[in-house]
Amino acid sequence: MADLIQHSSRQLVHLCPEGLGVNQYSWLPLHHEDKRTLQKNSEKRLLKSISVWIQKKFQGTEHPPEFNCIRRCVLPDLSVFLIIRKQFPCYTQQILTEHCNEVWFCKFSNNGTKLATGSKDTTVIVWHVDTQLKLMKTLEGHAYGVSYMAWSPDDAYLIACGPDDCSELWLWNVQTGELRTKMSQSHEDSLTSVAWNPDGKRFVTGGQRGQFYQCDLDGNLLDSWEGVRVQCLWCLSDSRTVLASDTHQRIRGYNFEDLTDRNIVQEDHPIMSFTVSRNGRLALLNVATQGVHLWDLQDRVLVRKYQGVTQGFYTIHSCFGGHNEDFIASGSEDHKVYIWHRRSELPIAELTGHTRTVNCVSWNPVLPGLLASASDDGTIRIWGPAPFLDVQDAEGLNGMNMKHSIHS
């Protein structure tokens, strides 16, 4: 324990907010060596208190498997900050079992009030997000397993795609449950990915057989790009540029207005999926046999490779999340959910409980303490803050004045 705490000190000081006392001397008009000494002493006191708190809290107790993450959460990165704010999703709050086969995809709506889950059983279930998630609607009519979904910008519509042999996509009105559009251009197509244009009036779709279409809400073809074997799609906020990962292990930007394209990301292994941060600057890639990679799209450079996740050639979907999207989560073939701070290569949490591959994770964009994971074990797990991390726990964490940080 002592070695682990000592190993964590640099990251803790670097990431811990000033309200926690570690950087409280940075304003002093002292020689930099004096300030460094004061800060180091403060750090030692904080880390010692963390150690005492952990040993007291966990000694002689048994917790469910997911609580194995707590020691990792508390130490390497934002541990104290996360626990004090009671917003870190490391505890299974609910297990959804309504699907009757593997669950391949899950996605919170943009306003955070709904969760859509898609399964090999061909159904899409829309859940209402509350203290406990409640089944809102079951969307049927899809003839294949549901491997990917996308919410419209206003959350009024939901599009679902199937696996490689699926030549159709389905567009539902979420409120009424009505199937508005069932689109298919050719029985030879493979439509496995979809992304909405920010205007909410168009979407792009494609697959690995060379289809790449732009369509309206009625499924009418507006534009197409020939010969692009699409793995995953994303529309940027400029309403013109579409990012597409392809079978050449790259992500290219396509402009449907002037029909130009350019290379943005080049990997050495297949890109199984990717997602983009809200500001459009960063892309998170799940790369076959390599794991999770973070790219800067503006500078076109690889920023970081995250360790821990088991990634073969299954399609696993990762996500950004938490305050300011400071965190990253991914499923894994070893049945776990891994969470990292964006600036740290090592995971700060490993969430256990699933019994088969975790295919997809989705972090609620409005509620930073809510995370969903979908697995081949047929369940969706809803992760939230551990219930025993109350104000008294936080105050006992390091013996300092924490109330400002707790309630801010």
Image (cartoon, rainbow, N blue to C red):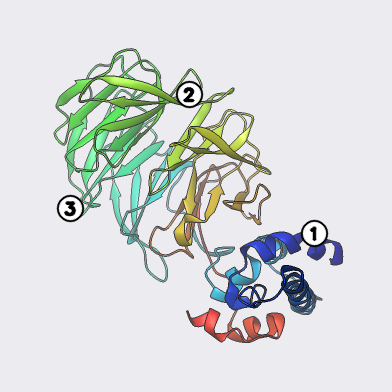
Q: Mark 2 points at which residue?
A: 250
- Cα distance, mark 3 to mark 2? 39 Å
Q: In this view, does 197 lie to the left or right of 115?
A: left
Kindly state the secondary structure of the residue where label 1 is placed: helix
Give residue 294's quadrant in the image: top right
Circle nearer the N terminus (3, 2): 3
Q: In this view, does 212 lie to the left or right of 311?
A: left
- For badge 2, the amino acid type reads Arg
Q: Where is residue 336 in the image (x, y as percent from the top left)?
A: 63, 49
In the image, what residue occupies the spot 39% across and 34% down? 145
Q: Residue 176 carries which label?
A: 3
> Is 109 drawn above or below residue 40 in the view shown?
above
Kindly state the secondary structure of the residue where label 2 is placed: strand
Q: Position of residue 310 (x, y in %)?
A: 65, 38
- For badge 1, the amino acid type reads His
In the image, what residue occupies the spot 65% across and 82% down? 393
